[in-house]
Amino acid sequence: MELLDRYLQAVRFWLPRAQQQDIIAELSEDLRSQVEEKEAELGRPLDDKELEAIFKRCGSPILVASRYRPQTQLIGPALFPIYQFVLKVVLLWILVPVFIVIVGPAIILPAAHRWSALLQTWSALWSALFVAAGVITLVFAVLERTQAKFQLFEKWDLRSLPPVPKQEQQPSRTQTVFELVFGIIGLFWLLAIPHYPFLILGPAAAFLKPAPMWHSFYLPMVLLALAGVAHQIVSLLRPQWTWFPSLARLITTGLTMIVLYAMLSVAFQGSNGGWHPFVVATATPDPAHSNRLTAIVNLAILVSLASAWLGLSIAGVIQSWECIQQVRKRTPHARDPALLRML
């Protein structure tokens, strides 16, 4: 019964993780018994409206889950799981990434004293977390004292509950093969660049050449490309390792971010308050024209690297969440109560 599965899934979301399996099993048995009794009484299967009436009598998923939660003082059991969820989203998935991706680099990269800027960013982060947590707690404390008056949980629709997610499938082998082929092509392209600068600079290779800073980062870039190819080979040979792609992507993203951050740091550490260029001009008949083009290319590379770092930061947050979900799926729900007490 799809409606029953959707209802149980919604209740499970708000339950304490350690008790989800037992509570859902008990609730499922009770609801199925009610459905079977009603079907025996009517002599036919129940339609959706009759099923919905049974679930309505039980109450909304949040209220049902609240009956199994311990009582709290400031925020009651009905609102407490929502309060926890909002805290996690705002503090861990909004404020922390914003400081890592936007606020931190904006303070640290231009600063002359990096450690001082890092401490300033750390202090600002904790202040923002403290203020946000206080505001959220205050809002939910007010809701706790007004939700009975406004009947916040009385109006709900069973059909608005999210559908039950499909079973996880193994990655497509065709997709993995294509990613492997493109990864190998990209690796050979990277290995050919020192001999054929035209591959990256295009026609500008006639009067531009890579700056010396690229020599320090060329090997890490090749190793990252090799890691990507190795990732696709393992995924192709071991498709049953459903946990591996998420972990490999997260590690590759983290290493790429480190390389990009190092490149941006070197670029901003130029002498006399300037910055190190990514490309330099060779001898040309029109030095003024080539210098203007060099400045444009350097600015374009700088913006591209900064944008890539920003995009990878967002991707890293998403991939971290995917890895956490993989770990949760591989962790048994039923645990020894004695072991839990020891922990």
Image (cartoon, rainbow, N blue to C red):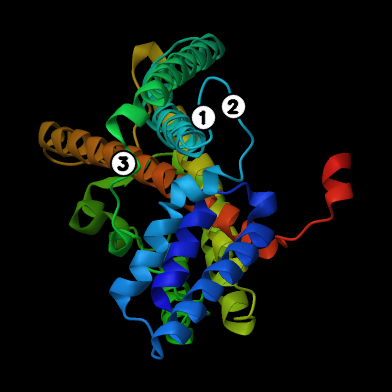
Question: Which corner quadrant of the image does residue 252 belong to?
Answer: bottom right
- The vertical placement of 251 against 95, above or below, is below
Residue at (42, 80) in percent of width and height = 175
Q: Quadrant of residue 280?
A: top left
Front residue (pair 302, 139): 139
Task: Tell me, for residue 72, which label it has, or none.
Answer: 2
Q: Is residue 218 visible?
A: no
Identify the residue at the far front of this view.
41
Residue that carries the numbered disc 3 in the rendered image: 307
- Screen quadrant of the N terminus: bottom left
Q: Residues within 10 Å of mark 2 (few under 14, many from 20)?
A: few
Residue 117 location, x and y as percent? 49, 12
Residue depth check, mark 3 versus mark 2: number of the one nearer the observer: 2
Mark nearest the camera among 3 and 1 is: 1
Image spot of residue 282 (x, y percent): 27, 41
- Say if residue 132 shows up in the picture: yes
10 Å neighbourhood of mark 1: few (<14), some, or many (≥20)? Answer: some
Under circle 2, the secondary element is: loop
Q: Is residue 70 left or right of residue 228?
A: right
Q: Residue at x 43, y 23 (%)?
A: 104
- Mark number for residue 76? 1
Alpha-carbon span between mark 1 and mark 2: 5 Å
What is the distance, in whole Å, between disc 3 and disc 2 at their CAs? 45 Å
What type is the residue that disc 2 sits on? Thr
| Circle 1: residue type | Gly
Q: Nearer the viewer, residue 259 or 64?
A: 64
Q: Residue 70 location in percent, x, y?
A: 64, 35
Callout 1 touching callout 2 (CB < 8 Å) = yes
Mark 1, secondary structure of its residue: loop
User: What is the distance, in whole Å, between disc 3 and disc 1 at their CAs?
Assistant: 44 Å
The residue tagged with tag 3: helix, strand or loop?
A: helix
Give the residue furthest to the bottom: 43
